[in-house]
Amino acid sequence: MIMKKPVALLSLFFTLLPALVWASPPVPFSGKVSVDGINYHGPAKFSFAIRDQAGTVHWRNGATANDAINVNVSNGRYVVLLGGQGMNPLPASLFANHDELYVKVSFDKNDGQGLRHLAPDQRITAVPYAKVADMVKPGAIQPDQFSEKILKYLKPEITL
């Protein structure tokens, strides 16, 4: 009887190991919800799916498109971990196999009307990126445009 517990634990470990090894870490995702131009505030249900350019879904938070998770929305803003918070894990090769992916978000404010698609779908990458960085052309910012305080951090002097 004493030997059965370690065997059961090892069995459980090896059963769960593939899911841990073949899954990506959760990806932070944030958004904003407004209803009739007013920022929503309070509990809501959300459904998330990751799709490619053609619309093929490669991941969803639950088993079906109607499976939703509870999320608190504060002044229109929400933050979730896609692949975490009780959602299906993200496939390990999801971002490696697809150059361009989008998050489809559906929202239910518990008013009896069910999930509604929040359009447009947002582009997503495995790591956050700054959209403004795409707009800055090389050489557009010169060192003389920074204050002395900033330059000190860019080129710190070494003192002994």
Image (cartoon, rainbow, N blue to C red):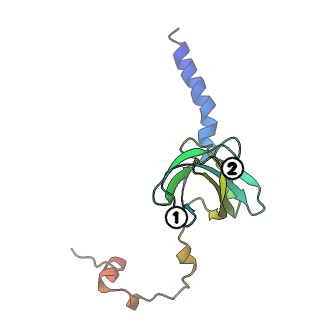
The percent position of residue 22, horizontal first and vertical second, equals 64, 43
Label 2: few (<14), some (14–19) or many (≥20) C-alpha neighbours in 10 Å: some
The percent position of residue 102, horizontal first and vertical second, equals 67, 61
Residue 90 lies, with reference to residue 135, above or below; the image says above
Q: Residue at x 38, y 91 (%)?
A: 144
Q: Is residue 59 left or right of residue 128?
A: right
The quarter of the picture where residue 104 lies is bottom right
Q: Secondary structure at mark 1?
A: strand
Circles 2 and 1 in contact, beta carbons < 8 Å:
no
Residue matched to label 1: 38
Label 1: few (<14), some (14–19) or many (≥20) C-alpha neighbours in 10 Å: few
The percent position of residue 83, horizontal first and vertical second, equals 59, 47
In which quadrant will I find the C terminus? bottom left
Residue 30 lies, with reference to residue 151, above or below; the image says above
**Disc with the residue nearer the chain's start (2 vs 1):** 1
Q: Residue at x 50, y 60 (%)?
A: 76
Q: Is residue 77 left or right of residue 88?
A: left
Front tag of 2 and 1: 1
Q: Secondary structure at mark 2?
A: strand
Q: Residue at x 73, y 53 (%)?
A: 57
Q: Is residue 79 left or right of residue 120?
A: left
How far is disc 2 from disc 1 in space, using C-alphas?
30 Å
**Residue type at tag 2:** Trp
Residue 16 lies, with reference to residue 87, above or below; the image says above
The percent position of residue 31, horizontal first and vertical second, equals 54, 61
**Residue type at tag 1:** Ile
Is residue 1 or residue 39 the one in the foreground? Answer: 39
Is residue 28 or residue 25 the one in the foreground? Answer: 28
Residue 34 lies, with reference to residue 136, above or below; the image says above
Q: Residue at x 40, y 88 (%)?
A: 143
Residue 59's tag is 2
In the displayed orientation, state which residue is furthest to the top.
1
